[in-house]
Each structure stands twice: as C-alpha cells, then as structure tokens.
Image (spheres, rainbow, N blue to C red):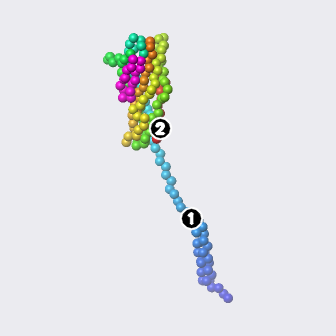
Amino acid sequence: MKISPKITLFFFAILGFTINTNAQSNSASASARAFATIVTPISITNTQDLNFGTLIVQNNQGGNVTLNPEGTLQEAGTVKAFTKAGTEQASAAVFQVAGQAGYSYSVTLPTGELVLQNTNTSAGGNLKINNFKSNLQSGTLGSDGKAMVKIGATLIVENDQKPGKYANETGFQISVNYN
C-alpha cells in the first residue's frame, strides 16, 4: 500500500501542532520595563557667619547672650549688646540648602560646645557657644529647589572675661539630608 504524500504531510502537520500545544502549556513568559530616577544631590552652603556682634560686660560679671535664628539678641546677666554706629551687629548664621524641588529634608545641628578663642593671644581667654537653634528642623525645598536655614546659639561670657575679638576659625557644621 502506497501512502500518498498529502496524507504524510497532513499527518506531520497534526503531529507538529500536538507537540507545539504541549510545549506551550508547560511555560510562559512576560516582559517588564525598567526605570530609574536621578535626583539633584542635596547641598548646603554658608552665606552668612554667626556673629554675636559687639558686647559690653558690665562690672566684669558674666552672663549669656542668646542669638535667635531670626537675628535678635536676648541678654541675660550683665552682658549687653553695644549698638553704637560702626560696631559689629549681631547676625544669625544663614545657610542655603539646594536640591530637588519639592523634596523634604531635615537639618542636624551641633550638639556640643564651640570654643571661641581671643585673637589677642597675649590677653588670653575663651568664650563658649552652645544650644544651637534653627528656624527649621525640617522643610520642603521650594519650586526653585532652594531653602534658607538660619542658625542661632547661646554665647556664655564668664566673669572677668578679657576684652578682645573672639573667633573659631574652624567653625561649626550643620548637615542636611533628604527625608
């Protein structure tokens, strides 16, 4: 008996569909797209230093001067601001935060004391700054990706504090992080 080529072709076609159907039911596949978002790194730049201004210590007795983040002084004890024209005036430290517009951030302030040394080394003496305060503990960057952070602190003046200009050339650091 002779098998016709058409029947043979038909037989192999059916066999091929059967094998292919079984293979498809044993596996599946799908695809996924991949994405990444790069944001502007957060940064902070000092635009104004912390300055308690020119002070007078009356009767050689100490006290405290608190400079709030808005730049106003609160005096305690016999330490008073000297506001005569031409003298240094008090100003809070100002920092500009920059990063991705609309992102929230937090501010970390120094927790210890900062020592200021009398630049007149023959007179000697130190002042201490502590209790750092900020106008913002956290915030959201504006539509321009920027924000201003203002820092104040408390200056401790000891009894018999020597006259002179006091400074800390290394300064203090604050940090900002995205939330």
Of the numbered discs in the image, which one, if any, rests on residue 28? Answer: 1
- Mark 2: give few (<14), some (14-19) or many (20+) Cα within 10 Å: some
- What x and y, as percent, mark residue 60? 41, 12
Q: Residue furthest bottom?
A: 1
Residue at position x 42%, y 29% from top? Answer: 133
Q: Quadrant of residue 158?
A: top left
Residue at position x 39%, y 34% from top? Answer: 148
Q: Is residue 166 visible?
A: no
Q: Which residues are magenta?
A: 63-77
Q: Is residue 6 in the magenta section?
A: no
Q: Is residue 65 in the magenta section?
A: yes
Give, as a three-letter code, the residue at label 2.
Answer: Asn
Left or right placement of residue 175 versus residue 144 in this view: right
Which residue occupies the foreground of this view, 79 or 117? 79
Q: Is residue 123 visible?
A: yes
Of the numbered discs in the image, which one, if any, rests on residue 177? Answer: 2
Of the numbered discs in the image, which one, if any, rests on residue 37? Answer: none
- What x and y, as percent, mark residue 29? 55, 63
Give the vertical position of 27 relative to 149 (above or below): below
How many marks are shown on the rendered structure?
2
- Gap between marks 2 and 1 measured at Cα: 44 Å
